[in-house]
Image (cartoon, helix red, strand yellow):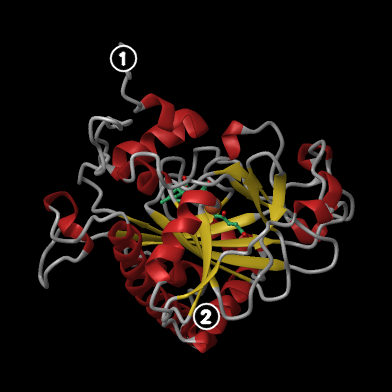
Amino acid sequence: MSTNIVVPLPLDFESVTKLPNSHAWTLVTTDSDPAATPDTVPVVDLLCPNAASLVRHACETCGYVQVTNHGVPSDLISQAELQTGRLFSLPTQQKLRTVRSPNGLTGYGLARISPFFSKRMWSEGFTIAAGSQAEHARQLWPHDDDDHDHRDSFCNVMEMYQRGMMRLAEKMAGLMLGSLGITAAHEDIKWVKPKNGCSNNPQGVLQLNSYPVCPDPTKAMGLAPHSDSSLLTILHQSNGIGGLQVKEEGIGWVPVHPVNGALVVFVGDLMHILSNGRFNNVLHRAVVNETHHRVSLAYFYGPPMDVKISPLIDNHDHPPLYRPVTWQEYLDFKATHFNEALELIKNDVKVM
Ligand SMILES: C=C1C[C@]23C[C@H]1CC[C@H]2[C@@]12CCC[C@@](C)(C(=O)O1)[C@H]2[C@@H]3C(=O)O
Ligand SMILES: O=C(O)CCC(=O)C(=O)O
Ligand SMILES: [Fe+2]
């Protein structure tokens, strides 16, 4: 890693007692308006026989669903949350050894979308992809003795967590696409269920988010509004500490309260494209609070980086809304154009 490139860094939150101007946003209200409670909280038991149609309905309307009986052991989830808390509680200098390089994907730093906002977010993140935890763990805990145990437990837990998430993501992708009548037999999505030994595998990126206690949550933004650039994202948030909000058409920001034992699944931009706009890639954000340190673990699931994704349901009434795009191309668009990325790959629909 080059050391002479300037990367904006997260704040040393612990040393701050007053919200600095650099982090003071306007109009971030954390009060949840009682009127802003959704009619139905979309919670789906994956063992329920009509799970697929419930998931489809949630994806078409809210753009997210909380799933229970998802098959990921609850103690693995709490272990991963514990390791996440432990990582972020390391001294800043130690975390900075793994700082993400300007064009890099993995490591410690601000959210990738930070450059699109004039104010800084009240959060820090740590991104893991394709086994990167091993190298980062060596940088975080370089010594042999005690460090060795930290390194091992961090790596083991994160590896198992990613494996569990991949399995669930494949299940959810199958359920979502199946609910639209698209099966794994479809030529264009053969990668959803890759054969053993096949190199063209779906990819996962694990993002650990930390939202420290904040002196003035009404003016701070944990994670600014965005949609995810994945096919789908599986999110675990600290039990009992809210912060996630989704934007509901005609209502505004609505809190997504953590449901014990449930994982939140978001429709990502690529799933919106695949479904030819039927599934809602919902805008969401995270707000912060004055009393509790909150963490979240977001697992971004996508196709093999070089596979073209294009709308799979098109017919004369609904011509394809988008041009084919790979995940890699889409991430690049997102990095340069952020929320306009989808517009850029829209087909020009000619009105006759
Ligand atoms: C696979 C992904 C998905 C990324 C980019 C890349 C790695 C890091 C992800 C996040 C994590 C935090 C929110 C987000 C909006 C961000 O800033 O970085 C995400 C972004 C996206 O969904 O676009
Ligand atoms: O922390 C949260 O609740 C939201 C995280 C999120 O949206 C993300 O990492 O993409
Ligand atoms: Fe997100």
The answer to whether residue 171 is seen in the rendering is: yes
User: Is 127 displayed left or right of 249 in the figure?
Assistant: left
Badge 2: residue crowd in 10 Å (few <14, some 14–19, many ≥20): many
Residue at point 47%, 67% (across, down): 139
Q: Looking at the picture, how far across and down is residue 247, in whole percent?
A: 64, 45
Residue 31 versus residue 14 in the image, above or below: above
Q: Which residue is mark 1?
A: 350
The answer to whether residue 299 is seen in the rendering is: no
Q: Nearer the viewer, residue 254 or 77?
A: 254
- Return the mark for residue 253: none
Residue at point 33%, 30% (across, down): 321
Mark-to-mark CA distance, 2 and 1: 48 Å
User: Is 221 displayed left or right of 154 in the figure?
Assistant: right
Q: Looking at the picture, how far across and down is residue 200, in whole percent?
A: 16, 58
Q: Are marks 2 and 1 in contact (CB under 8 Å)?
A: no
Q: Quadrant of the C terminus?
A: top left
Q: Which residue is mark 2?
A: 77
For the residue marked with disc 1, what is the amino acid?
A: Lys
Residue at point 26%, 59% (across, down): 202
Residue projecting furthest to the top = 352
User: Is 315 displayed left or right of 108 in the figure?
Assistant: left
2 or 1: tag closer to the N-terminus: 2
Q: Nearer the viewer, residue 152 or 62?
A: 62
Q: Quadrant of residue 324?
A: top left
Residue at point 79%, 43% (across, down): 28
For the residue marked with disc 2, what is the amino acid?
A: Ile
Residue 219 versus residue 239 in the image, above or below: above
Q: Secondary structure at mark 1?
A: loop
